[in-house]
Image (cartoon, helix red, strand yellow):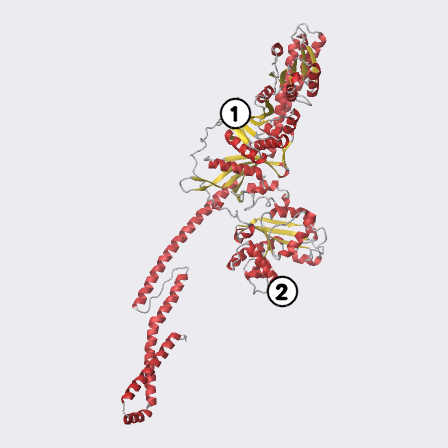
Amino acid sequence: MKRSDPRLIAAIALAGLVMALWLVLMSAIVWSTLGASEREAVGQVLAGRIALVFVGWVLGLIAVAAVLRVLHQRYVGAPHRLLEEARVVLAARRPQQLKPRGTREMQALAVAVNELAAQRDRLRADMDAQVTQASERVQQEKDRLAALMAELHQSVVVCNHAGRILLYNQRARQAFRALSQGPQLAGGAELLGIGRSIYAALERQVLAHAFERIQQAVAKGDARPTAQFVTAVAGGQLLRVQVAAVRASQGVLGRSTEVTGFVLMLDNVTESVAEESARDQLLHGLTEGSRASLANIQAAVDMLGYPDIEPAMRERFLGVVREEVASMGKRVTDLAQRSAQRLKTRWPLEDMLGADFAAAAQRQLGARCGCPVTLDAIDPVLWLKVDSYTLLQALTYLGTRLVDEFEVRFLQLRLARAGAHAQLDLVWGGQAMSNETVMSWEMDAMRFGTERTPLSVRDVVERHGGEMWFERERVRHQALFRFLLPLASSQPAPGSLAAADLPSRPEFYDFDLFQSMEEGRELEDRPLAELAYTVFDTETTGLNPSGGDAIIQIGAARIVNGKLLRQETFDQLVNPGRSISAESIPIHGISQHMVEGQPGIGEVLPVFHAFAHDTVLVAHNAAFDMKFLQLQEEATGTVFRQPVLDTLLLSAVVHPHQESHRLEAIAERFNVAVLGRHTALGDALVTAEIWLRLIPLLAEQGIHTLRQAREAAQKTYYARLKY
Amino acid sequence: MTQKKILIADDEPNIVVSLEYLLQREGYAVSIARDGQQALDAIAREAPDLVLLDVMMPIKSGFEVCASVRSDAALAHTRILMLSAKGRDTDLVKGMALGADDYMTKPFATRELVARVAELLAKERP
């Protein structure tokens, strides 16, 4: 039976009390009006019937209770049930109705609630339909984008304005596999991955220069700003990179000037550049060599034309002609054999407004040389065709040497047209220099502080097909380096680049990924959910790192932006250089012959280090794995300075009352499927899943940032030590 | 009038033999240098009136020789006619900027060369 409402019992008790008090009060009033004899008579009459009075009171009470109970049911119980049912309807995911009951008002209330619920259900169904439709569309767009990217023969990488990679295609992955230092180890995943910095793969300064140029172009209203450059990457390979800006959308009105990211198209041009330079040499040999030969022949033939020539001289001139004809014939044959070669690739020179270049040079020279740089007589409409990065390097290099070695106080840039070329002068006042000095500045590889480049000023000039020399202007007491540079083939009118013929942005994808993920805050104070993690595990020959046990397998997976990237994993056997004890084999399943022929820890650790670059390390019982890594620091020179989080300790933070924090136990608690347990990668993936589930649980406890997580872990660590 | 002295600075014997024969026939005193350094030494030693200066030479290029000569006031009278197999106009501009009096691209007609030499020698260098 349902327990009675205590309020009902109290009400009945109160009613009984009131009835009793009423009886006593009435009796007292009647009593007070009686005389002494009457009181005695009444006393006698009542004395025998007091039980009857009591029974009457009880009967009255029962009647009152019955009425109260009916009222209670009608006015308290029924609303209460209605409330509970309404709560169910409130929480229900599917349409549900109240049963009208009770008083008329209550029934009306129930009907009203039902109408509200029905309205809500309709809205919800509507929204669900829209969400489904939208996500289908997004999925379609994604699929289309993926298909499109896969079709491309070029490598494509998209990154946000901070250089974090948001998207790459299969071909980019292949390209970076070819560039990777240890291709068999991580397959390029240590260079290219979602959330990784593009700067790890490509030279930072060249790329930053391109980004900066694009941003400036965008700020000036250029509609389709692009930049391209060739850069040398690992292993001496040459990549040609084309960069385009991705801009924030401003609804239908057009594009904003805020650059949210960049699309990079990469081409490995190592071979074509090598071919090109070989062909250049051939062509060069043919043209210049032929000129010289022709000159020799022509001069000799002219001499042979003199009628009074002595026979001996005649024979000499004929000899010259025969020899030169033979050598020219050979040269042409050589060229014919080798010139059946392919497309022409050049160092890409880009069109750039001369005044823009001069302004950029002024900024950079000023910053690097620490002396005032002025612009003088800059032709405002001249368009150059330059590799602006290397040309700026050359100017900066010459400028710094002038300031450092000749104590030059100010520099000046001039730019003018000189026939079919542009003439760019780097001018300074005062001391001139010897031709030997000029020569060595021209031919030495450029250096900036500790930074070296393989290029000399001469190389840069050659790359432009230009010239450069030193000149004195005695009248003005000035000296200058003059660069002859190519002009852009057709001089575009400023502003004509703003093309209106393209839709404001590609339709096939919604780049919502461009929200910057992190910048501006210390790593320690960034939310756990935003950080990038490398979750890893090692298998070892035994449990005693200081006693000579060694790593035989490293497995790792990456978490970026709260997502486990299963396609970017690290999985590598390591030859420990010692025997694997028989009793450990059943645990990890790795036998001696499996590690033979595998790379040693000295090779694997640097690649793993690169793989884990810029992330927080996560491991289960991290102290154990870190100990093994730290013992290798000296031998391999690879030091892991990243912050480390331990899922064992953090699990204890979240579930302090659980007995076990073994990986299997936690996995079971979180319902994580355990596959390939006790392979390094298998365990790393399980640990990663656990870590993803721990993040929101930690947040419930007020642990949001890396700093807080580390402090909490430390506290439990000490707590556990005490026991 | 004294015999004018001409220095031929070129590392290619096959052109030197013709030029030497030609200029001797024209009545000049001819000497030969086989590379840039020899050319500088010969210019200092013999003070020729005119140098036929090839651009592409070992040790020192014709550009360097030209710049050195022009930086020495004592050699101000030396006329320089640059000869080059480099056909690019940037080379021509550079040669003239560095102080060459004239510049001829190979191949050239010997008659043209003789005419230019005579013309240069007739003018006084400022």
Left or right of A703: which side holds A579?
A: right
Q: Does residue A607 appear left or right of residue A494 in this picture?
A: right
The C terminus of chain A: image quadrant: bottom right
Mark pair 1, 2: CA separation = 79 Å
Tell me what residue is drawn at x 43 percent, y 38 percent.
A503
Which picture quadrant has residue A267?
top right
Question: What chain is tagged by disc 2?
Answer: A
Residue A196 image position (x, y, % from top left): 56, 45
Q: Determine whether B78 is above or below A203 in the image.
A: above
Residue at the spot of label 1:
A416
Amino acid at circle 1: Ala
Q: How many marks?
A: 2
Tell me if A32 is positioned left or right of B25 in this view: left
For disc 1, the chain is A
Asked if badges 1 and 2 are on one and the same chain, I answer: yes
- Dot 2 falls on a residue whose secondary structure is helix
Whether residue A314 is visible: yes
Q: Nearer the viewer, residue A275 or A224?
A: A224
Q: Which quarter of the rendered picture does the N terminus of chain A lie within?
A: bottom left
Residue drawn at (37%, 57%), measured in percent from left and top? A120
| Amino acid beneath label 2 | Lys
Residue A524 is marked as none
Vertical placement of A414 versus A192: above or below?
above
Who's the residue at 58% across and 23% down the image? A477
User: Residue A592, position in %: x, y?
Assistant: 70, 52
Task: Pick the residue in front: A245 or A363.
Answer: A363
According to the picture, the residue beneath numbered tag 2 turns out to be A722
